[in-house]
Image: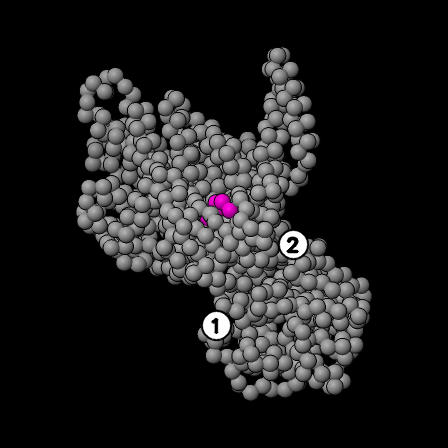
């Protein structure tokens, strides 16, 4: 693990690695001829470290093979042929298929090609399946993502998955089926069985119950409504919807128990064999079969390997060596797929299991053990005690998994569920045991009779319905789920150390006996107590530091985010007040910029409160991302230019502001100047009150009515140009307003009719920031605008090239810092 992680942050030349590995192997062979010692152990560790580092080289470095499909990146639309190698992922408005390329027809004719392509369509297309050979007209490239602190690196994610390129298809007619059954015959049989199961489930139950059954039985989550998935996320029970170690473990538990029960009917087998080992061996068949039915995705394969590792420990007579079995599972997975180390599900799965194995014994050590005479109680008195102990054990395991995964959940999802324990206490038995086991019985019965299987699936759906109602009730509890900012690495390490120390003290307390005075116990383990107090003080000091830091900084900081073709600007005033101007957004509303781009940046910056949100004008590329911000952040005020829109998103935006009782203001050039710790905020446009017209994207007057803001701090000014074009620029020049600014957010994303020469002369910017990204429909920034900015002497930063651009000043010096360089 250390070698793989090291390769991602400190890559070394392959030749160096070969030389170092050969030297370490030679040293290890020499040390093994001598008596065992620390030197041999260190040399062995170095060999594994270098081996892990080398294993990631082929993943992180692009292929130099002349036939690799990646050479067609950015070369426009091509015609390619490829085989579908995984079951397509189909949702209500999107289809994704993973293809193994076989050939490409481009400028030089038809050529052989190799590599994986993720085919993306903005339509629901469910006519293709595993093993189909397709001819596709697609534009090949890689979604570059958005270059902001805290942003998800989608290109790196695809590279770690072995995907060379993405293929973007605008219409299903661009895909032609050439031949079927080009994949593995065994896999095709499994896929046909999966399709039959999904058909039987959909006939037996209605949505969303059918979607839950499909997720539990065949690993297909596309039938679950988005809001239902969010409820599972908010209550900390989303793991039940993914085929994971829990599902495979239940299969193993039921299989071992059932096989052992049947084998115990034979006296011969009882006398000749260890039934637990025979049952463990025979249960491998249903485990692997269920893994294939569930799609054998990477998380499913990982879960199968984990459970099989534990069964191997039973087979070789070492069932107590569970941590070694866990280590073996991790080693086997990383041996064949080193990139899995960076997969979120890998980290969550192994941390959850490790926490259960490590913490549960320490937590259950607090359970009072019955005295000897109490163990001889009659059955009617012993059973309640056993059920209570089992309940405490289940709660302890759930608490251990929750504590172990909480920092990772906060790191990746910025959310913590405060009802996770009670929710899992109800949902896991209902969906994880009752529904899953009933569904598996129906799956087995489907080989005999689909009608009988459909009846069993219907009975399972009757349990799903109240489960979803309970989940909905828990989700509606005030404060059931809290949004948290992204924790730092030091905070994660300190949390794990604190949990480990407290668990160790709890275990030692049980060993020494709870009857011993607490003062004597604390004196005996004073080093651990001091460390626990120090870690607790660290968290308190960390929270105080974060609160004080934002209030005492005498710096004006403006960050222009990379939101593609749109605007989103965060202004942080001296004293800690924050203002977000626009939130980006897509024109078709399919991609939520607020959720996936703006919010991760704010959480990375440890921000969960926005004092003022400003919507310059209600166009999608400025508005749509703000809806998520209003809904999930503490927003005090909302400023608009007074325009209204019939767009449902705008109506939802204003309704959310009203429901959360956010103070709403209409501002324009007649509004009074705002002062914030020495920083003046001046509104230059629109010149006056706007009538309640309904703006259209094609309406130039709507753009010319957008808010234009100027920030002034002592010697420096920053001008945010909104979406104004030539007419509004001319009006500002003629108005005689003081436009001089060191930094200019180029109006209207640098389109052709923006940034006229008279306007640039009045502003006279030293730096110009263009928030844009070229699309098939818009050429932004336009070359003529770039030429005018160059003639004006401005240093140009583009968010599509440089990522987020941060401007900092204390009033005298000015620092402009791009997140990425060209």
Q: Nearer the viewer, mark 2 or mark 1?
A: 1
Which image quarter holds the C terminus?
bottom right
Tell me where residue 710 appears, x and y as whole percent. Answer: 71, 75
For the question of whether residue 273 can be seen, the reply is yes
Give the structural element (helix, strand or loop) at label 1.
helix
Residue lying at 69% horizontally and 31% vertically, measured from the top left? 16
Tell me where residue 357 appears, x and y as whole percent. Answer: 44, 34
Q: Residue furthest top?
A: 34
- Range of magenta residues: 98-103
Q: Nearer the viewer, residue 758 or 8?
A: 758
Give the structural element (helix, strand or loop) at label 2.
helix
Q: Residue furthest front?
A: 109
Looking at the picture, does residue 679 appear above or below residue 339?
Answer: below
Residue 47 vs residue 500: left or right? right
Which image quarter holds the N terminus?
top right
Residue 359 vs residue 725: left or right? left
**99 drawn magenta:** yes
**Secondary structure of the magenta portion, mostly?**
strand
Residue lying at 77% horizontally and 64% vertically, measured from the top left? 795
Residue 681 picture quarter: bottom right
Q: Which residue is mark 1?
A: 649
Q: Nearer the viewer, residue 556 or 102?
A: 102
Residue lying at 67% horizontally and 83% vertically, measured from the top left? 727
Q: Which mark is residue 545?
A: 2
């Amino acid at each position: 693990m250390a070698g793989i992680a090291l390769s991602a942050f400190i890559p070394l030349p392959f030749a160096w690695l070969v030389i170092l590995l050969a030297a370490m192997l030679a040293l290890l062979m020499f040390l093994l001829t001598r008596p065992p010692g620390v030197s041999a152990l260190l040399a062995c560790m170095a060999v594994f470290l270098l081996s892990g580092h080398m294993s990631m080289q082929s993943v992180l470095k692009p292929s130099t093979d002349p036939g690799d499909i990646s050479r067609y990146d950015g070369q426009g639309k091509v015609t390619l042929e490829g085989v579908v190698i995984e079951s397509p992922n189909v949702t209500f408005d999107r289809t994704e298929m993973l293809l193994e390329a076989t050939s490409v027809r481009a400028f030089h004719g038809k050529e052989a090609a190799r590599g994986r392509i993720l085919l993306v369509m903005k339509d629901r297309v469910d006519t293709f399946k595993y093993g189909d050979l397709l001819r596709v007209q697609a534009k090949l490239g890689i979604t570059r993502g958005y270059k902001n602190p805290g942003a998800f690196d989608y290109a790196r994610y695809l590279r770690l998955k072995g995907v060379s390129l993405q293929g973007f298809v605008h219409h299903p007619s661009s895909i032609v089926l050439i031949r079927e059954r080009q994949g593995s015959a065994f896999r095709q049989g499994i896929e046909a069985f999966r399709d039959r199961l999904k058909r039987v489930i959909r006939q037996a139950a209605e949505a969303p119950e059918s979607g839950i059954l499909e997720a539990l039985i065949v690993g297909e989550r596309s039938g679950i409504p988005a809001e239902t998935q969010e409820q599972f996320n908010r209550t900390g029970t989303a793991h039940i919807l993914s085929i994971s170690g829990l599902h495979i473990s239940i299969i193993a538990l039921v299989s071992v128990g059932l096989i052992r029960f049947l084998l115990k009917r034979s006296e011969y087998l009882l006398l000749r064999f260890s039934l637990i080992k025979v049952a463990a061996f025979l249960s491998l068949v249903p485990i692997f079969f269920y893994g294939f039915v569930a799609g054998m995705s990477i998380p499913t394969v990982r879960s199968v390997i984990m459970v099989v590792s534990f069964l191997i420990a039973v087979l070789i007579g070492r069932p107590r060596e569970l941590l070694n079995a866990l280590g073996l599972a991790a080693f086997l997975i990383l041996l064949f797929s080193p990139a899995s180390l960076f997969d979120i599900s890998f980290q969550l799965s192994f941390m959850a299991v490790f926490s259960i194995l490590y913490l549960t014994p320490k937590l259950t050590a607090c359970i009072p053990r019955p005295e000897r005479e109490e163990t001889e109680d009659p059955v009617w008195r012993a059973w309640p005690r056993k059920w209570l102990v089992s309940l405490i054990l289940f709660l302890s395991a759930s608490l251990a998994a929750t504590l172990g995964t909480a920092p990772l959940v906060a790191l990746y999802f910025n959310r913590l569920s405060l009802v996770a324990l009670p929710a899992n206490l109800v949902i896991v038995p209902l969906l994880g045991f009752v529904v899953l086991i009933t569904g598996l019985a129906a799956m087995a019965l489907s080989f005999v009779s689909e009608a009988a299987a459909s009846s069993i699936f219907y009975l399972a759906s009757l349990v799903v319905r109240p489960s979803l109602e309970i989940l909905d009730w828990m989700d509606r509890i005030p404060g059931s789920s809290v949004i948290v900012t992204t924790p730092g690495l030091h905070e994660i390490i300190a949390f794990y150390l604190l949990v480990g120390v407290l668990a160790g003290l709890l275990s030692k307390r049980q060993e020494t006996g709870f009857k011993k005075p607490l003062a004597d116990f604390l004196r005996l383990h004073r080093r651990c107590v001091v460390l626990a107090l120090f870690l607790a003080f660290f968290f308190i000091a960390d929270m105080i530091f974060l609160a004080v830091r934002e209030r005492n900084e005498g710096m004006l900081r403006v960050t222009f985010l990379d939101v593609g073709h749109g605007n989103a600007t965060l202004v942080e005033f001296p004293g800690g007040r924050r203002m977000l101007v626009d939130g980006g957004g897509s024109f078709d509303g399919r991609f939520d910029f607020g959720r996936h781009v703006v919010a991760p940046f704010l959480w990375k910056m440890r921000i969960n409160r926005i004092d003022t949100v400003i919507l310059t004008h209600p166009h999608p590329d400025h508005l749509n991302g703000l809806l998520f911000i209003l809904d999930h952040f503490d927003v005090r005020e909302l400023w608009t230019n007074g325009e209204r829109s019939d767009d449902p998103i705008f109506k939802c935006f204003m309704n959310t502001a009203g429901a959360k009782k956010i103070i709403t203001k209409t501002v324009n050039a007649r509004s009074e100047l705002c002062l914030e710790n020495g920083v003046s905020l001046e509104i230059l446009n629109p010149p006056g009150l706007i009538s309640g017209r309904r703006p259209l994207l094609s309406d130039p007057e709507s753009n010319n009515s957008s808010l234009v803001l100027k920030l002034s701090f002592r010697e420096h000014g920053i001008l945010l140009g909104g979406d104004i074009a030539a007419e509004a620029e001319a009006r500002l020049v003629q108005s005689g307003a003081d436009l001089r600014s060191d930094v200019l957010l180029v109006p209207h994303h640098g389109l052709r009719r923006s940034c006229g020469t008279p306007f640039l002369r009045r502003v006279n910017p030293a730096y110009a920031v263009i928030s844009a990204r070229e699309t098939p429909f818009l050429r932004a920034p336009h070359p003529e605008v770039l030429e005018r900015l160059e003639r004006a002497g401005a240093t140009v930063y583009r968010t599509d090239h440089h990522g987020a651009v941060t401007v900092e000043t204390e009033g005298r010096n000015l620092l402009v810092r791009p997140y990425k360089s060209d």
